[in-house]
Amino acid sequence: MSQSAALSQASADLKDAVYKRITLRLIPFIFICYLFNYLDRVNVGFAKLQMLDALKFSETIYGLGAGIFFIGYVLCGVPSNLALNRFGPRRWIALMMITWGMLSSGLLFVSTPTQFYSLRLFTGAAEAGFFPGVVLYLSQWFPSFRRGRIMALFMSAIPVSGLLGSPFSGWILNHFGAGQGGLAGWQWMFLLQGIPTIALGIGAFFLLADKFANAKWLTTEERAVLEADQAFDAANKPKTVSDSLGEVFKNPAIWAFGLIYFCIQSGVYAINFWLPSIIKNLGFADNLVIGWLSAIPYLLAALFMLLVGRSADLRKERRWHLVIPMLMGAIGLLIAVNFATSPAIAILGLTIATMGALTGLPMFWPVPTALLSAGAAAGGLALINSMGQMAGFLSPYLVGWVKDASGSTDAALYVLAAVIVAGSLLALRMTRTLRAP
């Protein structure tokens, strides 16, 4: 081996060691935070199994309450992310987590539709800056060529929240169903899943560093590696006329990416909010059994997400690693609808849909983070995320309205499958000249 080749290999080994250390230091804690973030967001899907009968809510009331969360989320997404960029991730993430943990726990006191709508709305507002803020935060630590696997590791918290949260939620509903301590099972679920979020928020204040430049646990040599890679990324991003918020809103690529993300999230939230109910309608009555069956799609989705993320980075390919999972999401929903009388095949369809739709999420984010300049990223990523989260309002409300009107969720799932296909076609267009860095 020549001297230059040996030096190059030594440099590569040093980088691998540095990023492995940073991954082990940051990702486990952020993963757990996002796990509870997602659990607090979608646990109404399990609460619904008892909550609707106890409070005499219709399917439409539930769908509106589940979805109105995202009105607050969308309205506060951009300003919250800008505040995070100004005040620092450590303080802002801690404040967000403590606030939404308290609001999510407060759902146990709901007794009217108005109370349900209000708490869900404010919880969405409190959570709004967390996900785009973490995406921005991770992009400031990891260069673009490593973001596929990092985003997959971080976002595998979504299927893991279903994998662990589904049986846990089913157990809570069964174990506390008799009303221990004066609370019903669904009330205990909101309480027991909200309190850890508050504790994690306090932990975020003490455990996170705002940026690698002031992370005391990094050595001078490790900081130099990060500075060099971040400088290389910045030099190779498309140049923008201005990074002002006004220019962000005028950028057509940001709106196109937001629409793609909306299409992906349409399938994701249909699955998250309605999977327990769909499985129940297949003929399963016991809440714990429903919980374990709901965990199967999430387990396979977590494994698939990690494999695809690693493959995307190793092959330096983004386009098909995004589009193929999206199409899997649509195909899986169609299988579930057309084989509803065969529980085994229907659950297989739901599993394929979950694997595809959830894997589309981490495969999407390396694309805009690679294309947006540092100044445009704070507002741009939040705007893209806010557009995607609009699906969190429209998707569950559509399914609930169709279920009340027709007695079946089939027509809504057909529409959502079509939306995902449309998003995949737009993704093909937007990524036709893209090469992974």
Image: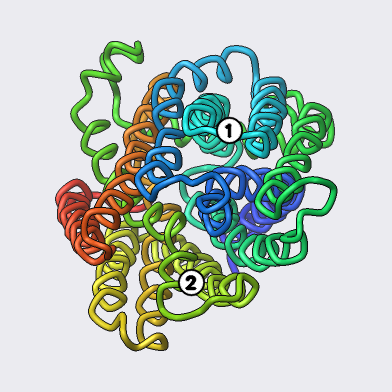
Q: Residue at x 52, y 33 (%)?
A: 112
Q: Secondary structure at mark 1?
A: helix
Q: Which mark is residue 304?
A: 2
Task: State whether residue 231 appears in this view.
Answer: no
Q: Is residue 99 above or below residue 61?
A: above
Q: Is residue 408 above or below residue 369?
A: below
From the top left corner, tell me how far across and down residue 51 is, in percent. 56, 50
Q: Secondary structure at mark 2?
A: helix
Residue nearest the observer in this picture, 239 or 322: 322
* Quadrant location of the N terminus in the rendered image: bottom right
Q: Residue at x 26, y 46 (%)?
A: 260
The amino acid marked with disc number 2 is Phe
The amino acid marked with disc number 1 is Tyr
| Residue 103 placement: quadrant | top right
Q: Residue at x 27, y 65 (%)?
A: 408
Q: Which mark is residue 137?
A: 1
From the top left corner, tell me how far across and down residue 97 is, in percent. 68, 31
C-alpha gap between disc 1 and disc 2: 25 Å
| Residue 229 placement: quadrant | top right
From the top left corner, tell me how far across and down residue 78 is, in percent. 43, 21
